[in-house]
């Protein structure tokens, strides 16, 4: 074992500095500073180099974490990057926004001995940001382009990862997306304070320079027919994500100033990108000077409350029907939100929205937790006669997302979907019930994580290349 490792006994865990809450709420910049080189090296050296690395097992991409930590501790950063990117198409994105406490770091063995986990995500970000700075990341160069094309619907992490892997093999790739910029939720969902947009843009620019064609502002099913894409390409990938907001059907639902989370976040992200957003500029989607209530307990709700704080809301409250221990969002994000002044109203549920034209207040009922439901979390039950009223000038629903009706949208009633509307695939091959059409990411799993979307995109790429190789050989035989 190199003497540069196993330092967890002597070296304490240290994360990159987090900017102070009262300073960071003044802007939308990321809240964690970068490691300086010596810190990244020192923190990497804490790894215990386990024979069976649980961090690697619990990383959806099975990143070779102990090896790139060792390389980083030995100042072999370029090799560390080569290794990190051999399993992950966006290590700097995952390093920033994976819920590491539930994945790699949550399974770090040295934490179980009371020493505090290795800060894996921060080192992964450091290695890859350094690779960008030093110019080690280069566009893909193709010497022999294969005369077969793949159409990818959706430029989110699943579509982008699949595109990159197939381009490396020499295929022609076209990505279709209904938004004006590629990146999916990395651009229009996740706010800058978690993931600054230049991080996503430099990746998508690299893919463009690698010869991947992007056709933005094209909604498949509307601006171009799904059938047309089937004719045009040798294989297709559906990676459209999930966008239908879940809603609560309450009295007062139709009052003004009640918004779905994605509408609020997209407007804020567009403003950050310098776009003109009429509904923001006229004040509707701007939380400034408003009493804002966000309903929901997941990561999207956390992004909404923290965005509202940065827009100078008068007050920001998050209403959630379970308690802190039973909420789906990352504890790290709840903690960040609390530091930034968000008030959490646990065990409470909206019952009615009150107002004349615009929302003025909401009627809330208190909840208690019963037996665990099918998700394993305790089921919330209303407490009778517990209602109280809360003032609200703006209400944001962050209750989760469902898939759109793809068979209808694509005018393809043969496309098999589950009872939840997610696309059904063969999990061995990522292929749908139609040969040559594959699917990946949230549209298969339901709302999930970036790292799982990347994993799916990579697996779909492997299956698509096998499928195309067979197709090519059949053509040769038939000729
Ligand atoms: C607010 C928010 C915060 C999140 N925070 C985190 C986080 O911190 N960490 C984390 O790991 N995950 C987070 N997630 C989840 C993560 O963003 C998703 O799991 C991931 O982006 C899914 O990737 P995808 O490629 O499947 O879909 P998406 O990223 O949704 O991309 C799908 C793309 O398909 C396009 N599209 C859809 N329909 C069509 C059509 N008919 N024609 C053409 N194009 C179409 C869309 O425009 C979009 O660009 C968050 C999600 C949200 C909403
Ligand atoms: S991709 Fe996510 S889970 Fe895997 S090592 Fe990186 S931060 Fe951890």
Image (tube, grey):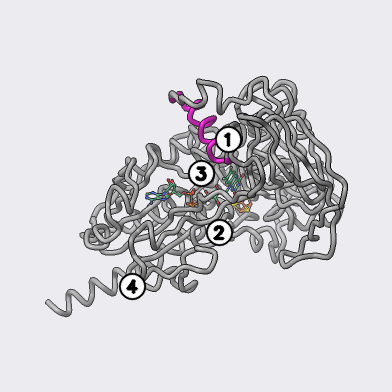
Nearest to N terminus: mark 2 or mark 3: 3
Q: Which residue is mark 1?
A: 191
The residue lying toward the viewer, choosing from 58 and 13, is: 58
| Structural distance between the alpha carbons of marks 3 and 4 | 28 Å
Asked if the residue at label 4 sits under 8 Å from ligand 1, the reply is no
Residue that badge 4 annotates? 435
| Disc 4 from disc 2: Cα separation | 22 Å
How far, Cα to Cα, is label 2 from label 3? 14 Å
Q: Which residue is mark 3?
A: 185
Residue at mark 4 to residue at mark 1: CA–CA distance: 37 Å
Q: Earlier in the sequence, mark 4 or mark 1?
A: 1
Residue 141: where, in percent of width, then height? Answer: 30, 48
Work out which quarter of the rendered image holds the C terminus and state it: bottom left
The spot of residue 92 in percent (x, y) is 55, 42
Badge 1 or badge 2: first in the primary sequence: 1
Mark 2, residues whose alpha carbon is within 10 Å: few (<14), some, or many (≥20)? some
Q: Nearer the viewer, mark 1 or mark 2?
A: 2
Q: Residues within 10 Å of mark 4 (few under 14, many from 20)?
A: few
Q: What crowding class fits label 3: few (fewer than 14 Cα within 10 Å), some (14-19), or many (20 or more)?
A: some
Of mark 3 and mark 4, the one earlier in the sequence is 3
Q: Is residue 270 magenta?
A: yes
Q: Mark 1 CB in 8 Å range of ligand 1?
A: yes
Give the quarter of the image for residue 369: bottom right
């Amino acid at each position: 074992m190199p003497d540069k490792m196993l330092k967890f006994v002597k070296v304490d865990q240290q994360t990159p500095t987090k900017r102070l809450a009262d300073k960071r709420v003044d802007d939308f910049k990321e809240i964690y500073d970068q490691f300086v080189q010596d810190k990244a090296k020192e923190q990497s050296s804490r790894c215990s180099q386990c024979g069976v690395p649980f961090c690697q097992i619990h990383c959806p991409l099975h990143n070779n974490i102990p090896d790139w930590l060792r390389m980083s501790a030995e100042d072999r950063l370029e090799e560390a990057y080569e290794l990190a990117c051999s399993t992950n198409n966006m290590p700097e994105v995952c390093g920033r926004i994976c819920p590491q406490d539930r994945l790699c770091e949550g399974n770090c063995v040295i934490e179980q001995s009371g020493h505090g986990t290795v800060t894996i995500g921060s080192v992964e970000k450091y290695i890859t940001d350094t690779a960008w700075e030093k110019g080690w990341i280069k566009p893909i160069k193709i010497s022999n382009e294969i005369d077969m094309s793949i159409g990818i619907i959706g430029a989110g992490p699943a579509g982008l990862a699949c595109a990159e892997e197939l381009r490396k093999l020499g295929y022609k790739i076209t990505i279709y997306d209904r938004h004006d910029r590629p990146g999916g939720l990395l651009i229009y969902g996740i706010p800058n304070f978690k993931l600054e947009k230049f991080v996503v843009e430099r990746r998508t620019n690299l893919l463009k320079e690698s010869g991947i064609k992007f056709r933005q502002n094209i909604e498949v099913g509307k601006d171009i027919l799904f059938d047309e894409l089937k004719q045009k390409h040798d294989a297709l990938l559906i990676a459209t994500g999930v966008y239908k907001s879940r809603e609560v059907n309450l009295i007062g639902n139709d009052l003004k100033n009640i918004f779905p989370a994605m509408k609020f976040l997209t407007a804020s992200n567009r403003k950050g990108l310098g776009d003109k957003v009429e509904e923001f500029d006229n004040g509707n989607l701007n939380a400034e000077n408003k009493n804002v209530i966000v309903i929901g307990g997941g990561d999207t709700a956390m992004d909404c409350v923290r965005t509202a704080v940065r827009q100078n809301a008068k007050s920001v409250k998050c209403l959630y029907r379970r308690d802190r221990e039973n909420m789906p969002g990352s504890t790290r994000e709840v903690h960040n939100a609390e530091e930034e002044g968000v008030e959490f109203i646990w065990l409470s549920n909206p019952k009615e929205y009150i107002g004349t034209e615009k929302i003025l207040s909401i009627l809330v009922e208190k909840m208690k937790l019963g037996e665990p439901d099918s998700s394993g979390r305790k089921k919330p039950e209303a407490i009778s006669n517990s209602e109280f009223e809360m003032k609200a000038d703006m209400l944001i629903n962050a209750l989760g997302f469902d898939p759109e009706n793809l068979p209808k949208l694509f005018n393809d009633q043969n496309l098999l979907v589950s009872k939840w509307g997610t696309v059904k695939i063969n999990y061995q091959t990522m292929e749908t019930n139609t040969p040559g059409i594959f699917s990946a990411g949230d549209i298969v799993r339901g709302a999930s994580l970036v790292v799982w979307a990347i994993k799916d995109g990579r697996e779909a790429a492997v299956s698509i290349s096998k499928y195309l190789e067979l197709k090519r050989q059949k053509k040769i035989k038939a000729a």
